[in-house]
Amino acid sequence: MSRSKNDLPDPLIFAAAGAGIAVLATGAALWQRRRHRESRGQEETIATDAPHWTLDKDSSRAMFGKSVLINRPRAELYAAWTPERFPDFMENVVAVDDLGDDVSQWTIKAPAGREVTLVNRITERVEDTSIYWQSTPASDIANSGEVRFTDAPAGRGTYVSLILAYDPPAGKVGRFAAKLLQREPEVQARRDLHRFKQLMETGEVTTNASPSARGAESPAEPHI
Amino acid sequence: MRAVTWQGRHKISVETVPDPEIVNPRDAIIRVTSTAICGSDLHLYDGYIPGMRAGDIVGHEFMGEVIETGAASTLKRGQRVVIPFTISCGQCFFCEKKQYSACDNSNPSETRDASELMMGHAMGGAFGYAHLTGGYAGGQAEYVRIPYSDVGPVVIPDDLPDDDVLFLSDILPTGWQAAVNADIEPGDTVAVWGCGPVGLFTIQSALLLGAGRVIAIDHFPTRLALARKYGAEILDYTQVDVREALDEMTGGVGPDACIDCVGMESHGFTADNILDQVKVKMLSSTERIHALRQAILACRKGGRLSIPGVYGGFADKFPLGQLMEKGLSVKSGQTHVQRYSGELLDMIREGKFDTISLISHHAPLEDAADMYRHWHDDQDLYTKIVLKPGLKKGDISARQELQHA
Ligand SMILES: NC(=O)c1ccc[n+]([C@@H]2O[C@H](COP(=O)([O-])OP(=O)(O)OC[C@H]3O[C@@H](n4cnc5c(N)ncnc54)[C@H](O)[C@@H]3O)[C@@H](O)[C@H]2O)c1
Ligand SMILES: [Zn+2]
Ligand SMILES: [Zn+2]
């Protein structure tokens, strides 16, 4: 299943991580397989208008996408999607450091107090519309992604879609990263996207921080 | 501080817990002066609501005094405020449509997944009502953190006592929305199932909105007496066949609008309800919908069904064919409290509602465990309980008994 990233269909480089994770190799392979299947299937079935990331869910754990409606103008959201603001709403992102030349290094919390480093390059920007990125070889986890901003109808604001793909790693990053990547990036990215919505609409990230009679909990920290 | 906590089915205890803190700029902290027990709390007490955790602070009907504000709160220290039970941001698509209980920001990222899985979409946040609605600590406590305090809280003028306005937090707007949702036309006959606090405010609201006649159904004499006092004709379902009576009172047509103010724990020993009870016990169904079934069958063709009563999941033997064939329209939902606060406060000032006579007991917060037991076991006499954090344990005052006319 290993492919070089030159095989990626351009400009359809999928997603990125809300937490900065997306597939490269595996994702590309799955994507191309799906595209073949779709073209082959055109006589028997009718092509749907569903977003590509919703198709063939069962077979493609390594790729995922999520859209949310955010009640703010498209340009404002595009402008706010900057690495400096990521730690405000991306829960597991400890830091995003600018390495220059559109490359940034992401420090991400992993289980057991460990950290994972992603090194991603922005490959394309379409003003007020979308941002694409993919990892460089220095990244602990091969990933790629896209965040897309589309006008919602009837003045409702903007649909923000986060599409990401990642290569479930082995070896180097070891067991803990594998665990991190089970389905965790999907959950994390979905939650991060919602926190982005909260921040942009309400000016703050929603929290249920409040007291309880459970000794271990703090009234200043969120709880499940 | 002291707070009323849920510890499991039929287990309520008052515990010492940490004080709440300001966490976000829009937050405020209030010191609670009055907090009521609701029929919805009964669903928690009976273990019908999924997503409760031992140690949760309960209560969603409360008011108090602002004692601390975050940088972006518009409240001022010392103001008296009633807090809507629904937590709403005021800025999302839903809040802008005034569908406040559907707020898409108030249920935090951490808790919305389970809610989404169960309901299809994550519910809005609410105080003291399980983790499906955000897991926020409730108002049966000395102090509460109020998120988005620039949007929800209703500032109360000093000349209005707590008892006049406390129910702006939930049951008054809930009764009002129940009647609004019935799309009442002048002269309509409106039938109301359940004469608990929600039903009692629904009766008052339906008459204010132009109903010619309200027929209220329950089996507790004290509650039925209150319904009559508020202007309803009453039916005790232990004395009559409700559907026959409703038909005979409307020339065989049936009520124009039917409102279910009972919810998921219908009483009664009819065959369908006994079967529901067994199924709920065996976990193969989540609710007892006897009253709702009856309301659908009783409603006139082309009539309207309004459901403020709370349901939690998959009901059994829902009369879908009857609903469809009779062409009923249905409106439902948790109340969009913030939508009605202003007009209802004005109406209270104008004396349009009786918010007082349904209160049967004032009791100290410390006596909450006993009060929950009475609220569950003695529904006839305990028609609404208001807890006061200030009172000494045992300092309970009960309303004079009503005349059952
Ligand atoms: N939609 C909302 O936002 C909202 C807000 C508050 C309460 N509620 C819900 O409204 C419902 C009523 O609340 P409440 O505080 O009045 O509760 P309650 O328990 O005090 O009242 C329910 C009443 O229904 C009566 N009843 C039971 N079975 C009946 C039957 N078969 N026919 C006729 N009457 C019957 C009971 O005797 C009782 O008097 C609850 O389900 C509650 O959760 C909804
Ligand atoms: Zn209530
Ligand atoms: Zn909202």
Image: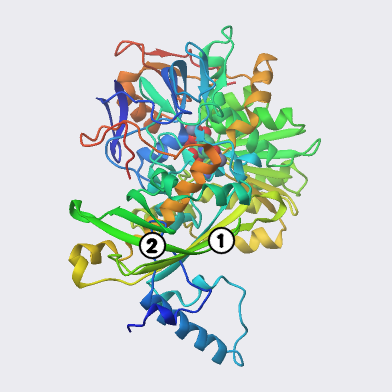
Is B106 above or below relative to A152?
Answer: above
Is B334 above or below relative to B371?
Answer: below
Task: Tell me the chain of label 2.
Answer: A
Q: Residue at x 33, y 57 (%)?
A: B282
Q: Is residue B274 in view?
A: no
Task: Tell me the chain of label 1.
Answer: A
Q: Is residue B185 left or right of residue A28?
A: right
- Residue A177 in which image quadrant: bottom left
Kind of residue at disc 2: Asn
Label 2 sits on residue: A120
Regarding ligand 3, which quadrant of the image does it lie in? Answer: top right
The mark that comes first in sequence, 1 or 2, is 2
Q: Residues within 10 Å of mark 2 (few under 14, many from 20)?
A: many
Label number found at residue A101: none
Q: Which of these two is toward me, A181 or B330?
A: A181
Q: Which of these two is toward me, B36 or A106?
A: A106
Label number found at residue A130: 1
Query: Can you give x and y, in whole percent of width and height, for residue B278 in the image?
Result: 37, 55
